[in-house]
Image (cartoon, rainbow, N blue to C red):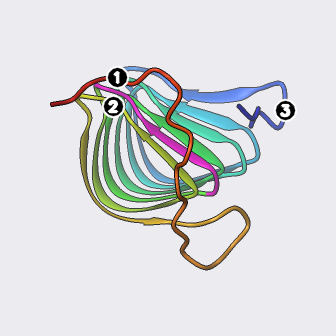
Amino acid sequence: MKNYNNSASCCILEKNSSIKGEFKSECDFRVDGNFEGTIETNGKVVVGKSGRIEGSIVCNAADIEGYISGNIHANDLLSIRSTGEINGDVIMSKLVVESGAVFNAKSLMRGDNSEDASVKKITNFSGAREKTA
């Protein structure tokens, strides 16, 4: 997994805190409170279980455990944990959705460093897998 932390620091919006507006940064950003507006970072966005975002996110990667209503553009990996919920439009290169997550989104998967949508064929099924039906 890539390390997206572009500096030694990480910006954090603590639980029971709220911000409305525009956030731009080079470092990672963790949201455990409420954010309304636009987030733009070259790092990773982490939305904790108590985190809520209403707006848009542009980042290199995102790890979602909380709630998002809006658009997400992750240049690399978008990971939605079992407690996560996304409602909106999503663009990413890689997607991981855990069992129990809510994913109500129109999505577009882009290839690495490509502006064209691509379909990636999975050919290696040798790893352990969860039976779903």
The residue lying at 72 percent from left, 50 percent from top is 42
- Rendered location of residue 28, percent (x, y): 67, 36
Which numbered circle lies on residue 49?
Answer: 1
- Rendered location of residue 55, percent (x, y): 38, 57
- Rendered location of residue 9, percent (x, y): 77, 26
The amino acid on which the numbered mark 1 sits, given as a three-letter code, is: Lys
Q: Crowding at label 3, few (<14), some or many (≥20) Cα neighbours within 10 Å? A: few
Q: Which residues are magenta?
A: 75-82
Q: Which residue is mark 2?
A: 66
What separation in Å lies between label 3 and label 2 (alpha carbons)? 25 Å
Q: Is disc 1 in contact with disc 2, using a CB cutoff of under 8 Å? A: yes
Q: Which residue is mark 3?
A: 7
Q: Compared with residue 116, is residue 22 higher up or lower down, i.e. above or below? A: above
The amino acid on which the numbered mark 2 sits, given as a three-letter code, is: Gly
- Rendered location of residue 91, percent (x, y): 48, 63
For marks 3 and 2 on the same chain, the one whose residue lies earlier in the sequence: 3
Residue nearest the viewer, comparing 26 with 92: 92
The residue lying at 70 percent from left, 31 percent from top is 1
Q: Quadrant of the C terminus?
A: top left
Q: Compared with residue 86, is residue 10 higher up or lower down, i.e. above or below? A: above
Report if residue 67 lies within the magenta region. Answer: no
Looking at this view, name the residue that lies furthest to the right. Answer: 7
Name the secondary structure under disc 2.
Answer: loop
The amino acid on which the numbered mark 3 sits, given as a three-letter code, is: Ser
What separation in Å lies between label 1 and label 3 (alpha carbons)? 24 Å
The residue lying at 52 percent from left, 50 percent from top is 122
